[in-house]
Image: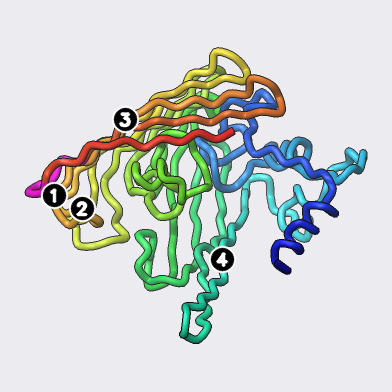
Amino acid sequence: AVTWLLALLVFVVSRRADAYSWMIRHDYGGCGSCHADPSGGGPLTEYGRAQGDLLLRMRYGSTDEEPSRSSEWLLGLVAPPSWFLGGGDVRAMGLATKANGAALSTDFLLMQADLRAVIAAGGFRAGASVGAVSSEGSAASVVGPVVSREHWAGYAFLDNALLIRAGRINLPFGIRSVEHPLFVRRDTRTDLNDTQQHGVAVAYSGERVRGEILGIAGNYQIQPDDYRQRGYSGFLEYSPFARLAVGASSLVTYAKRDLYLQTADLRQAHGLFVRTAPVRPLVILAEGDLVLHALDGPANQTGYATMLQA
């Protein structure tokens, strides 16, 4: 009763706050203008930080339009050169369990504590992250609990519209989201947590069309080699209007021994997605994918994964 009363009290006394996570409602269909990664996520460009402050910052009723120090790197304590883009991410959880008749057990889980940096000097691009997690079994592990989810280098052409890079890269597939526990991201194995793969990627960001394809050479942070998937992953998106984007994704990989199914697996995922803001306060994200596993020995698996967010 006390817990419910406190929760209700929070809702009673809290004031209105506005936070908008989907930039398509502000007529931004692409990702490359605000993010160093052309498909979204990771460190922000200088322009992205400015837009985040202008469009996403909670003002709590204030009419002050002056830039906040929260948009500056390390809250303005350090002024890095224009070619250096930095950032960080922290995810942690405290867990307390009380089973009937047993003592209370507590645990602290550090799921992410990453520092990220991207160098953008002329056409040259290079990015990397390094961090730590509680477990030593992460597919992004470098040694023990030390992880590197991304590290890549490349070059941008056509006034930054075309980027070619090589290294450990986020899989280009579907709707790019930091919500890695979403079933559609987990079942297609295309989340931003630890499913990145080594390979060569080509990304294009035009006014109406954007897309990226990654030739997958495998995850060289796991061993033996039989566990490594090889193939491709990519998406293509078209934006006929400022607040509407529709796209298609495709992924095909083969591993002699799948990391989770423990048998040879020809894995496929193919689907469609849409991002739209029919009216400014409402953003709709939808994705549907067919997921196939052709296994050596056990029966083949065919299923689907979907999501709808409003």
The three-letter code of the residue at mark 3 reads His
Query: Is 174 situated left or right of 58 in this image?
Result: left
Q: Residue at x 34, y 48 (%)?
A: 197
Mark 4 surroundings: few (<14), some (14-19) or many (≥20) residues within 10 A: few
> In the picture shown, does residue 259 fall above or below 184?
below
State the SS at label 2. Answer: loop
Query: Is 194 situated left or right of 106 in this image?
Result: left
Mark 3 to mark 4: distance in Å?
A: 33 Å
Instruction: From the image, tell me which residue sits under label 2.
Output: 258
- Residue 156 is covered by the magenta coloring: no
Give me the disc on residue 254: none
The three-letter code of the residue at mark 1 reads Ala
Q: Residue at x 44, y 55 (%)?
A: 149
Query: Is 196 situated left or right of 274 in this image?
Result: left
Q: Whole-percent x and y of residue 138?
A: 37, 63
> What segment is highlighted magenta in the picture?
293-298
Q: Whole-percent x and y of residue 309?
A: 55, 35
Mark 2 surroundings: few (<14), some (14-19) or many (≥20) residues within 10 A: some
> In the picture shown, does residue 112 fall above or below 307?
below
Instruction: From the image, tell me which residue sits under label 3.
Output: 270
Of the pair 287 and 59, the residue shown nearer to us: 287
Instruction: From the image, tell me which residue sits under label 4.
Output: 92
